[in-house]
Amino acid sequence: MQIVLIDNDQRNQLFPLNEIRANANITSGILTNKERWEYVSGTEVTIITPAYLQDLYPIHLDEDILCVDASYIFNEFQIKKILELSLGNAFVFNKKIIAGRMLTHSTIHYSFFQSYPFTTLLEWQNDLIHIDYPWKIFQHNDTLIRNDYNLITADRISNSINKTNTVINPQHIFIEDGADIQYSSLNATAGPIYIGRNVTIMEGCYLRGPLSIGENSLVKMGAKIYGATSIGSNCVISGEIKNTVIFDYSNKAHDGYLGDSVIGSWCNLGAGTSNSNLKNNAGVIEILHPSSITKKTVGQKCGVIMGDYTKTAINSSINTGSIFGVCCNIFGAGLLPKYLPNFSWGVVEKYQLEKAFEDIEAWKIFKQETLTTEEKNILTYLAKNNN
């Protein structure tokens, strides 16, 4: 049986995080959905996504497939339950099929999945985490870090913690090989702390769980990181961060506040950049998301949702409930606009594609990586279809 994670027909609601990746490759908690399914199943997972992204995810479909809506996040026990589905059976949640096992040689797409003639439809009986808008990522991050921590540390022994550190609840802290942590405070009272391979945490940092820091990342001196925060691999982090998810290869390397936010890959927040995550009247935050003609109620806390390859100038002031597209170079006086489309230069002009390629390549070289042909093709497609 082959596992297939498929983007649904509302994937544009995840703008801007969906622009350069499939839903299954969006980080939440410690893992992506693809990684989560592969951990539990022990098999490689296939991804179905729009055509302009599909080259990133080669397709080799077997006859017997288990198709799953990638916008839903299942814990270990729920995944195991779905893996037990018999051919022709499917689970239904909120009147939509969320997982089903079928026989097919056809090219799979979401509408085909929803209309497939399953012989038995089983009503899903428990609540599920549904990442249908980007702010749901940080809203569910506390639960997802805990679930992923239990999954990836089960029956494993953590590396020891250097005695120069102040440690509270060490039984809920897991340190991977090569991590270097000295003269800092690690408090796992409110949730677990996971430190990936070869992470460096400099002196004087204060870390509170639930927290995850991905491999090869650097946390600079004096950083204050609250739960529930997830930091990807190869990131550079400093300042004050709370309830935020930062994808791989992004930098918040200086002072400034970042809270209740999601930051894509290859982003850079200039020194002093801070966001507001709470209205002055403590009121409910509403966002006019580009996928909708009506405002969406987010809750009382929301900072910024930032697309990949986007950068802010020093001392940038980001408003409550902001959405910035991919490949933006953001600068401007006073509070920045709450919405900036893909390829914004400053706050009113357009970032020229060739200049964007040049700048991205420089950042890639800075982190010993290269800009691939597939990435260029995706960005070219987005630039041509930018609204």
Image: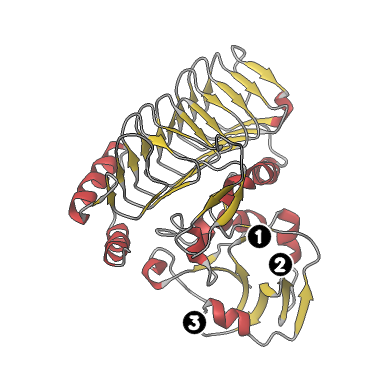
Horizontally, residue 321 falls left or right of residue 158, namely left
Q: Measured from the top left, where is residue 364 in percent x and y?
A: 29, 43
Q: Amino acid at mark 2?
A: Leu
Where disc 3 sits, the SS reads loop
User: Residue at coordinates 65% horizontally, 60% vertically from top-left?
Assistant: 41
Q: Which residue lies under the disc numbered 1?
A: 41
Residue 232 in the image: above or below residue 83: above
Q: Nearer the viewer, residue 180 or 127?
A: 127
The residue at the far right in this view is: 125
Q: Which quadrant is the C terminus positioned in?
A: bottom left
Q: Residue furthest front?
A: 281
238 vs 87, left or right, is: left
Q: Is residue 63 visible?
A: no
Q: Quick one: label 1, few (<14), some, or many (20+) residues within 10 Å?
A: some
Task: Identify the residue shown where x is 35% and y is 45%.
Answer: 310
- Label 3: which residue? 107
Counting residues from the start of the chain, the first of labels 3 and 2 encountered is 2
Q: Would you identify the image quadrant in which residue 33 lies?
A: bottom right
- Quote the CA–CA distance across marks 3 and 2: 22 Å
Q: Nearer the viewer, residue 281 or 235?
A: 281
In space, the residues marked 1 and 2 are separated at their CA atoms by 8 Å
Q: Secondary structure at mark 2?
A: helix
Q: Of helix, strand and loop, which one carries label 1?
A: helix
Residue 112, horizontal then vertical, whole percent = 56, 83
Q: Which residue is the site of mark 2?
A: 83
Residue 103 to residue 99: above or below: below
Does residue 28 lie above or below 233 as drawn? below
